[in-house]
Amino acid sequence: MSVKFSKHTILTAGILAGLVLGVVLGEVLYRAYSGAVPDGLLEGLSFVGNTFFIGLLKMVLLPLVVSSVIVGVSSIGDPAQLGRVGGWTVLYYFTTMAIAVVLGVVLVVSIQPGRGFDEAFRVQEVQQFSVTTGATQDRVEAASSIGLWGAFKNIITQLIPENPIADAANGRLLPVISFSLMLGIVLTVIGPRGQPVLAFFESLFAAVMKLVDWILWLAPLGVFCLVAWTVARIGTASLVGPLGIFMVTVLLGLMIHGLIILPLALWVFGRTNPFLYMHQMRGALMTAFGTDSSSATLPVTIECAETLGGVSKRAAGFVLPLGATVNMDGTALYEAVAVVFLFQCFGIALGPTQLAIVVITATLAAVGAAGIPSAGLVTMVIVVAAVNNSLGLPEDQQLPLAAVGIILGVDRVLDMCRTTVNVWGDAVGAKIITRIAPDPV
């Protein structure tokens, strides 16, 4: 008797194989070249993964977001119902992010991974970051002058875009979502005159999802190359180095949030078996881990949620694109742990006021973090600056911004883990909102 495997089973097996083989190849290369893997090999792996997989996913991202939001909003119909759905969605996002941040603060204060930290390693990494030039250093320097008000103003500015076309060209999704949301409402309100335009976006959404279906077959190759590139640069030995306790603290927080808090929320408010749903979303979760990008994973998240997870088209079209942009549970938790850890490394005590500032600013900074690799590392600088300002210490006694160089080496690995939690949080939110906005029978 022949055994038939579904497309999703084959893809899941392929992505899992890509993850495992990517780790193996990366570690072999790292050891073979004693940690100095030739740039040509690294660039080759990065080129294949980013061009033939992430590049294709990003290619469909903009039309997917525009069409899915407009179709999702128009399918809800009544603006009052949309307001109810939107209100519950935003409440869910901010509540889960706040819980994640508080959890991170509690863990890092209890475990204290920065106490007695290797001073020689600390000095070496800070000095290296200070003298190195590159995109990350430039972005950290730029973020240092933003401040808490700047971060809040940035979010509001994106919600009221002056030129959504320019924002779309620059890859800023929140302004695009905001414009699409308003356009979807207007097309619904004007009735029959909006139907031709809605029909166009419905067709566009169907076409883009079919394209996503084809692109997904490249997922195993893309994940394999990206994971191999990551491990080849840092090696698995970094997991047990001076930053081992810090990594354990972050991973413990992500596990508690992803395997206890979010499933509990789904079980209570979504009336859904959380671990069955997690299994249904496995393709998106593994893709998030491999690609390290919530935005790039969005097409896969929508596809898995609708076809396997039983999420309504209304919820998938509205909740998931918004979540990939503003809902960053894992990033918020990571930023809270990392900031307190760095202050611990430098022996700077934080009181209740400073910890409260960490909670507030980490939540806002996570909302403003782009759904791209290592965005949380840059927005974390906003949190550091806010805490420094609250301490009232002389500048030479404050935490230097170059301190982020201490965690730079392991940021990519932790980013893969927190991105997975980000996507899982989006998926849980979409499933919960499905109870409020189910598809018409």
Image (spheres, rainbow, N blue to C red):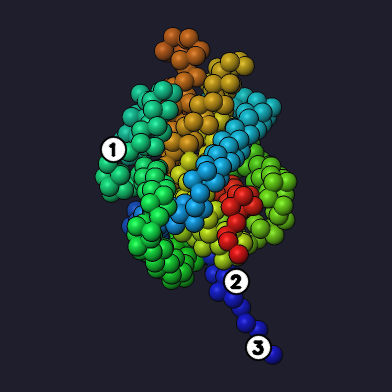
Q: Which of the marked residues, 3 or 1, is nearer the chain's N terminus?
A: 3
Amino acid at circle 1: Glu
Instruction: For the residues labelled 3 and 1, say whether their Cβ atoms are less than 8 Å apart.
Output: no
State the mark number for residue 9: 2
* Residue under the point 44% across and 38% down: 369
Residues packed near mark 1 inside 10 Å, few (<14), some (14 to 19) or many (20 plus): few
Q: Quadrant of the N terminus?
A: bottom right
State the mark number for residue 162: 1
* Residue under the point 54% across and 46% down: 81
* Residue under the point 55% across and 39% down: 87
* Residue under the point 72% across and 52% down: 271
Q: Secondary structure at mark 2?
A: helix
Q: Left or right: where does residue 237 sit relative to residue 291?
A: right
Q: Position of residue 228 (x, y in %)?
A: 47, 58
Amino acid at circle 2: Thr
Residue 100: which quarter of the image? top right
For the residues marked 2 and 3, what is the alpha-carbon distance in whole angstroms? 16 Å
Comparing labels 3 and 1, the label whose residue is closer to the camera: 1
Amino acid at circle 3: Ser
Q: Secondary structure at mark 1?
A: loop
Work out whether residue 366 or residue 128 is closer to the camera in this orientation and state it: 366
Q: Position of residue 125 (x, y in %)?
A: 45, 32
Q: Position of residue 348 (x, y in %)?
A: 55, 17
Q: Relative to 201, say whether 238 is above or below.
A: above
Q: Position of residue 197 (x, y in %)?
A: 34, 59
For the residues marked 1 and 2, what is the alpha-carbon distance in whole angstroms? 44 Å
Q: Quadrant of the C terminus?
A: bottom right
The answer to whether residue 342 shows anywhere in this view is no
Instruction: For the residues labelled 1 and 2, say whether their Cβ atoms are less than 8 Å apart.
Output: no
Q: Report the residue marked by disc 3.
A: 2
Residue 309: which quarter of the image? bottom right
For the residues marked 3 and 1, what is the alpha-carbon distance in whole angstroms? 58 Å
